[in-house]
Every structure is written in C-alpha cells, then in structure tokens.
Amino acid sequence: MWKRITSIWIIGIFLLILPLVFGASTNLILQDADTEILNDAYVDESLADSNLGSETTIRVRDNSSGSARRSFVMFNISGISSGFIVNEAYFRWTTTVFEAIGRPRAFEVNTTWNEMEITWNNQMDGSLWDDAKMNTSLAESNSSGTGLGNHTFNVTNMVRRAISESRGNITIMIITTSGGAGLEALANSKESGKDTSEFPMLNVTFTEISLPATEKYIINAKDFLNLPIVNLTVNITNGSNLDEFNVILSTVNGTINIDNRTVEAFGKDFYTFLIMANDSGGWFNATIQNVNITDGGITTAEMFQSVLRVTAFDAFDNSTISSFSATTNFSASEGSGSTTNGELLLLMNLGNYSLTVSASGFEDTNIDFHRLALDNTTLNVSMGSTFSFSLFREETGLPFNTNATNQTKLEIVCPQETIRVIFNNVSNISKIINCQFTLMQIVVDYGTQGSYFRTLIPDFTQRQIDWYLIDLNLGDIVIQRIISLLDLTKEFVSAKLTVKRAVNGTTKNVIEQRFDASDEVNLFLVKNGLYTMEIDNGVQTILLGNLIPTEAGTQTITLPAIEFVPQETILGGNVTFSYTFNATQGILRMQYLDTSNKTTLIRFTVFENSTMQVFSGESLNNASAIITFNQVVGNITYNTELFVQHQDFINFTDKKVFFQLTGTSSGALDLEGWTPAEQRDLKKWFAFIFLAIWGLMFSRLHAGIGMTTLIIWLWIFRIFEWVEVSGLIFGFLALLAVIGWVVEAMRKN
C-alpha cells in the first residue's frame, strides 16, 4: 500500500509517479503482502534443510541451544529512484510473542532470494548467496525496543545504498545473539492472514531533487597494465563524520555512475573516495581525496596488488646508494621509478617480473622474482661493477691462446658464492661482479699434458685484471715450486706472497697468493725465469729476493730474522733466555737457547692482570725456541711464566711482570706544532736537565731527601714516557739514596 501524508490521500497508480514530479517530502510505507512485502520467511538451525517460507510466523532465537532462528523480509523499493534523496528509513517488526531474548538486531542482505527456497543451510553456506552480499559489518542496526510489540530499526543507510545501486528491493535479516536456551520472539508473516498493520513494515521518507540532473560523475579503475577492474566497491564520504554523508556503491561492470543530484543537497563539493577492488587475486585499496563530483567528471583509480621497497647497496663496501632507478619488463608505469633518498617504492600486480636497477658508476643489475597478491616486502639489491680480464703469455706478453687449451676457467671466490667464467676461444672477457671477492684463480687445463693454476688478489678498485700464463703448446716448461714459511712469531699468518716478473721490460704481478693453513704456497713458474718475491702481512712488506726455478722442489723461508740477545743465563751459560715486550707492536716474545741440547720441554704462559690466562705456547725443541704472544694491548699489566724441563735439573720456572703505557705517540702533554720525534727529544732533555738540577740542589744539603725525591721524579717521567730507564738504573739510584740517608744520619751524630 502506498500512502502519501499530505493534505489529502490519493490512492492509485498515480502515487507511483507523483514523487518524480514534485519536490515535496514524501513518506512511503511498504507493508502490503506480495506487492510491497515480496518475501518473508525464517530459517531454523535444527531444521537446517527445511524450508519454512509458508509458515504464518517469522521467528528469531539465539544460538545458545544449537537451534538458532533467523528471519528475513524483502521489500519492494522500485518506486524510489536515484533521483530522490532518502531522508530517513525505518523498519518496524511487531512481535506477538517476546520472551527474554535481548535486543533484536537487523542486517542488510544484498541479494535476491525466494521465500519458498530458503533454508538454514543454503543461507549459511553461500549456495543461495555468498558472504560478500551479507553486508553485516556495514549496515547493522539495533532495535529501539526490548519487549513485546513494535521494534523499530534505523535502516537509512541500507535503503540509500540499495537505491543508489538501483536494486529495486532490499532484504532485512533479523537475528538475536542473547537470551536463554529455547527462548524466542515471534511476529506475523504475510501468510498469517492477519491484518496488514501487523505485518513487517518499511517506512521511507524521501525528497525529490528539485533541479534536473545535469552531470554524471564516473568512477572506474584499472591496473598498471591499463586493464580494467570490473568488480568495484567505492565508499564516498565528505568528512570525518560518516553520519554527515557516507554512501557505498558497487558495480560488476567496471563503471560507477553518480548522479550529481544525490549529493547536491548536502552543500559540499569535495568528497573522499575509498575504492576497493573485488576482483579475484587480492588488491590494495585506493584512497582519492578532495574530489568535486557535483560538476561531473571522471576518476580512474590505479589499483595494485603488491608493494615492493627497493634499496641498493655498493657490493664492495655495503654503503647505501642514494640515487638509482628501476624498471621492469612490463609497462613504464608498473614497477618503475627513480629515487634520490636510497629507497624506491614500486606498486605492482602479482606475477613474474624481471627488474633492472641502474645507478651512476655501477653496472645495471637484473633480478628475476615473483610477486604474490598483497605482498609488502623489501628487496635489497647489491650493485657491482664491470671487471675486464685479459690473458697474456708470460714469456712474450702477447695474447694467450685459449683455443689451444682443453679449458681455461676463471674462478672468482666470494664469501657466499664462486663466480665461474670460461674463456672460449677468446683472451678478453668482461664480467659484472657484485660481491666482495677474496681472491681470483685461473685454471689452465691442457688435457693429457696436465694443468696448472695461478691466483691474484686484486683491489676492488682494480677493474682491469691482467693474467700472465704459461703456454705449454709453445714450448714453455712449467716448474712447480712450493714456498714453505717458517713463521717464528706468527706475525705472518695468512700473509700474501707476491711473485713478480719483467714482461716486455715492465714488471708485472704474475702471482698473488696467501699462505695456507700449512704455511705454504704452491707456485707454477716458467723454467729458468727470473722472478722476484715479496711477502706482505698487512703491516709490513718484506722483499724476499730473486728466484730462478730450475727444478721442482720446496724452498723454506724463515721470518722474521730475530736477533737473540741473552738477558739471563743458567747452567754455567749453557741455557740463556730473554724477553721482548712492545705494546705498540702488540708483541710479548720469549727467546730460549740451550747449547747443551738437553731441554725436553719449554712452556711460555701469559696472564692478564695476574690471574686470567690469555696465552700459552710450548716447544719440544731441545736447543732453541721462540714463542710470541702477539695480542698485547697497552696500559695492561701482563704476568709471564717460563717453565723449562731439562735433563740436568728437574724443572725451572722464571716469572716476570710487563707493563707499558700507550695511547700517545710522544708521551704525555702533547705540544702543538711539534712533530712526535721533536716532542720526544724535547721532553727527554727537559727531564734530564730537571733531574740533574734537582739532584744537585737537594743532595748538597740533604742527600737522602734529594736522592729519594729524584727517584720519584724519575719514575713519574718514565710513566709519562718522557724517558726510558731500566730497572738496573733504578736499583743503582736506590742504593745511592740509602747511602745518602746513612750519610745524613752520620752527619747529625
């Protein structure tokens, strides 16, 4: 039944078109069976597959007993077009039985259905409608009553949405989620035969827009490949208060048309769109703000499924590259861009990608990867540089003939990988390297003739790497020499051996190789070639001299050459030992010599601050030993214990204490404008002159006081590293001080 509440009541079909002509406020009550109430039914969880659409009541019950009930009512709203503004809409449900079930709740169901088909199971499992069409989270409304009689629900937003989507009908679901087991509420259905006034009712108050529609505003969306996204939902608001204006529109054909009359009455021109893609695969939402929709126009949202943050690093020092660009194998708009702040945000679809990252001073880096829907991750790109490798014959300096070899293979050893490069009939190859390599090794294989290798350890900045190789096919004879290092002090652990040779009048590094765990390097050299060798431990480089390989064999090098100066002697001079302590060089060394060759064990132990053992070394050599602790730190007291077993006595122990103040290059009190050497000389002469004057002034009158204070001053200058004074001198001065005190006492007596 249509009712127009004005000065008169007009019944008939004219009421269906009258609101479209006049701009007055209209109140529409929908309650007639079959024409206005299209469907009403309830479903019962305990009768899950039963249809109850012909029942004379519609019921609700909570789920505490496992037999919940829900009611559904569908109203015909086809008489309200999008040319009207819905001011208010209320749903009234009149109960004839109301037990203690709590406050009923109403939800919108966005689909069509038939009261003679609906069951508990098909409304739950999606065979009748899916969850996406049950907008419970967006359109919930609570009843205004809690007892028997009328229950009113505000469904304004539900009706606005249904009209804006031109659905022609709206379904309201009534449920309750509280109450005792088995308790329920009942209302008459349109099949009850009761008076129409007792049926469910929808009351809509709406206003016709007085101005004719002049413009349409279009909303659509596409992905980064410019393909349309057809299943869209847009939430339109004009402020933080959603009650002021909040409408949700949907489409499955890719375009949402907005008649500007639907927003004109609100008096605002600028709105915010929250655009949601419902197409399969998963999409991030797009928010577009400050859109004027009253004057017509179009908004096309670029939707994306994946977010990728790209950062770039220098492969050789791990520093951040601030400026770089990235492009993919798709269109320029998808997964492409540039940055100057070290991070690039790429918006992409799901799928497989090939990404190219470019930066000034680095070679382009290509990375293949796969993106999933709703991925939000970071990709760290390590960028390298192009290294060029050239092969030459060592004897002539001419290009090396790789075609005559079985295989010529270059291996670039990095911490996490080994890069392999094969020289196929070429003597020059370029390769992008993006790892911190530790060495490079080239292996030349001549098949049945044998093979050999050579290594180089170039700097990261050396982009042109020249290899000088031995050509067996041209008569070069390979001599294998093993260089064995006898490292007396362990100062040359993992030291680098460099082998040089003059090629066409220019000295070239033909081999750079570190000593292995056995302190050996394996060299392949040209017979009768003149080579120069040097060793580098990172602190110093020592020239070892020349080598002319004539035959295979092993050559031993002893480092360092330590001069032995005995400090203490036992067994009539047959056994001597001494100590070297230098905190600046980090060395505490013990040297031992037994001319009788009767020593059976030598053990040298170092303690930090008397108690904590930090080092222990042993030797079973019966004649001599050098044991070095090479991790000494300044300003720390070290206690040492030398333990010796000898055939002429059971054992022998010698204990010492070492300390050295460090942290300044020229002693305390740095002088600006003076070099460290000049400061040391100046402070040394000042200290000696001061001590001489002090001793003469006081010793003439008070010998004991003068010598005692002289020793104190000397100790202070030694602590400040202004002078170097041995314990022997301190002992001699202490003896003079004692004599001074004795003389003072005799003088008084």
Image: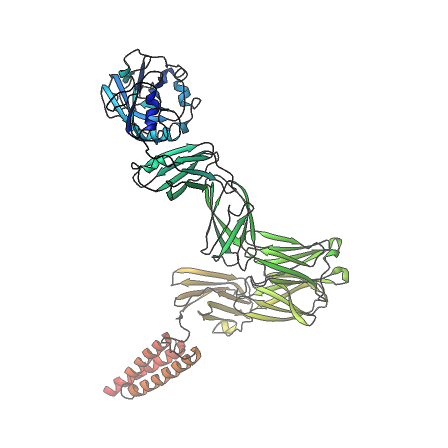
| Residue 33, horizontal then vertical, whole percent | 33, 16
Above or below 161: residue 383: below
Identify which residue is drawn at 56% across, 52% down.
Answer: 365
Q: Which quadrant of the figure contains the N terminus?
A: top left
- Residue 317 in view of the camera: yes
Q: How is the image coloured?
A: rainbow
In the picture provided, is 162 more to the left or to the right than 743?
A: right
In the picture provided, is 467 more to the left or to the right than 666?
A: right
In the picture provided, is 120 more to the left or to the right than 629?
A: left
Q: How many numbered marks have been drawn onto this rendered protein structure?
A: 0
Task: Return the residue found at the far top.
Answer: 193
- Residue 741 in view of the camera: no
- In front of the other: 488 or 650: 488
Identify which residue is drawn at 44% across, 22% down.
Answer: 127
Identify which residue is drawn at 41% across, 32% down.
Answer: 250
| Residue 54, horizontal then vertical, whole percent | 36, 12
Above or below 187: residue 420: below
Residue 196 is drawn in which quadrant? top left
In the picture provided, is 535 more to the left or to the right than 235?
A: right
Q: Which quadrant of the figure contains the C terminus?
A: bottom left
Above or below 563: residue 482: above
| Residue 319, horizontal then vertical, whole percent | 48, 58
| Residue 377, horizontal then vertical, whole percent | 46, 45
Residue 274 is drawn in which quadrant? top left
- In front of the other: 534 or 632: 534
